[in-house]
Amino acid sequence: MNIALALFQAAMLWSLQQAVSAASWPATSPGLLTALFLVFLWVPPVVLMLWKHQRQAVLWKASGSLAIFLALAGYVAFRDFPVPFKPGELADIETARFIFPLLLGWLLLLSLLRARLEGGLWYPAYPVLFRSVWSSLCTLAEALLFTGFFWLLLFLWAALFDILGNPFFKNLFGDARFAYPATTVAFAVATQVIGASERLIAGALEQILGLLKWLLPLAGIIVTAFTLALIPKLPMLIDSGEKILNSAILLALVAVTVLLINAAFRDGATEPDYRPWLKRALRVVPVLLTAVAATALYSLSVRTLELGLTPARYWGLIAAAVAGLFSASYAYAALRSGPWLASIAPINTVLAGILLLTLAVSLTPLGDSLRWSVANQLQRATVATVAESRVGALSFLRFEAGRQGQLALESLAANDSALGRDAKTMLAQNSHKKPEPADPNATPERFDKWRRSLRTLPENASISIKLDIALRAEFMRSATTLDPGGNAEAPIMMFNDFNADGVADALLIGGTRRGEPKIVRDYRVFVAEADGWRLASKGSFSRSN
């Protein structure tokens, strides 16, 4: 039955890929396409990994609830994207801001659901939760490793026959109609085999945790030495208000140390076999770790206030807050008398629930990291009194915020103001680096005056915002040529399909007549493309009087 589920998953994913390739339904509905992708990509693995609990209704209710949540989250997040929808053309930030919280939240949900199925309670005993988390991670890692080796053997098979001049297997294995079911079935077989040999997982887990716990004393030395070196620098950090520490490294130190503490604590049934003096010394580590987490949070906050919110800083702030919660809670557990760090058992359960809720909210418009970042940078650009801050905010919207940033920047460019002109200039750029204008005499005011004198043929033709952006960019490079002043004729723009692609292009004729006789004029050809207008050609031409 689990093989049938794997084949059904493969068939649905292949069908969705075909719809994208053919630009047919449901690819004509970006929200629906994303919803279906998320459901068929993430829900079947949950059922496959927990297949031995197939008779429990909780598994199917939880899987159905996950499917509904993913469908709604995907639909709402991508419903306004252009048609036909091509997931491969999404900006990195548009996929990362969704995949990162989804992956982490999926792992947490899988572990909590497994604990519920094995323990019978949504708030299970800590040993059950501990075993569930680590077993889920081990099962997933082994299943992915098995699937990877499965494909490695297939690639070797294809390569062997290919060197003999027989490309049949190379073509077969590269065909999506084979690749999808082969992958999902291999994963399903791996989860079934692993599920039938839990003693092997328990043995492997015992070895892994047994090794990791002996790294905790080294981590404790690092935390202690770093914190002692950090304390003298804290006044300078606070007084200067500048970022002097890399918060990512600080958070990595907190995460690794928390992991090693849990490897030593395990399920809390027995204390680690450290020497008594070492256990007492290690109680200091969570207290010092709190200072490291607080420093990371402060450094990130200063950076965000200075440069605005981005998805990376959004998640950095969340990570720093979670690190602070873990560190402070572990410090409380360390300072209490009794068994070594005994209080971290309920702490881990509560914080896992908080983290899962946070990740779930981040997949909705309420907690969308990109949405919050675009709104923050848009506000920064609007209220900025320093040119550097305004340019930085506009640059983020142009190059780092995907479609949401592009739309926000275009809304600014529609306004006839200094900010609107800056937004138009930013839209015309093709890289993060601000290009130096080719003409030192070009100014926004000069462009506005020249633009008002521009005539169109036919007279009722309108110049779109995106074409206006391309015009502005070219004017800033060639103002003296296009606007020589004196008795120069008014520039004129003619619309016609010059490249015979069925879409009207634009021919700009500007400058002044020159030569003897005066028959030389300057021209610029702009070609309409999906994402705007591109300067395709420029130069001079001769015409009769």
Image (tube, helix red, strand yellow):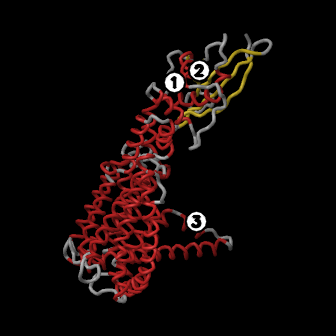
Q: Earlier in the sequence, mark 3 or mark 2?
A: 3
Give the left or right position of residue 450, taking residue 339 as reference: right
Marks 3,1: beta carbons within 8 A: no
Looking at the picture, which amino acid does disc 3 mark? Answer: Asn
Examine the image and state in which quarter residue 407 appears.
Answer: top left
Q: Nearer the viewer, residue 50 or 125?
A: 125
Distance between the alpha carbons at the discs numbered 3 and 2: 52 Å
Q: Nearer the viewer, residue 418 or 534?
A: 418
Examine the image and state in which quarter residue 384 appears.
Answer: top left
Please indicate, yes or no, whether residue 434 appears anywhere in the rendered image.
yes
Point out the image quarter for the N terminus. Answer: bottom left
Report the disc number at residue 463.
1
Dot 2 corresponds to which residue? 493
Residue at image location 36% in from the left, 85% down from the top: 202
Q: Residue furthest right?
A: 516
Q: Point out the frontmost of discs 3 and 1.
A: 1
Label 3 secondary element: helix
Report the disc number at residue 171.
3
Q: Residues within 10 Å of mark 1 (few under 14, many from 20)?
A: some
How many labels were placed on the picture? 3
Q: Residues within 10 Å of mark 3 (few under 14, many from 20)?
A: few
Report the disc number at residue 496.
none
Looking at the picture, which amino acid does disc 2 mark? Answer: Met
**Residue 138's x, y, as percent?**
39, 77
Distance between the alpha carbons at the discs numbered 1 and 2: 9 Å
Give the left or right position of residue 96, taking residue 264 as reference: right
Is 178 situated above or below 405?
below
Distance between the alpha carbons at the discs numbered 3 and 1: 50 Å
Looking at the picture, which amino acid does disc 1 mark? Answer: Ile
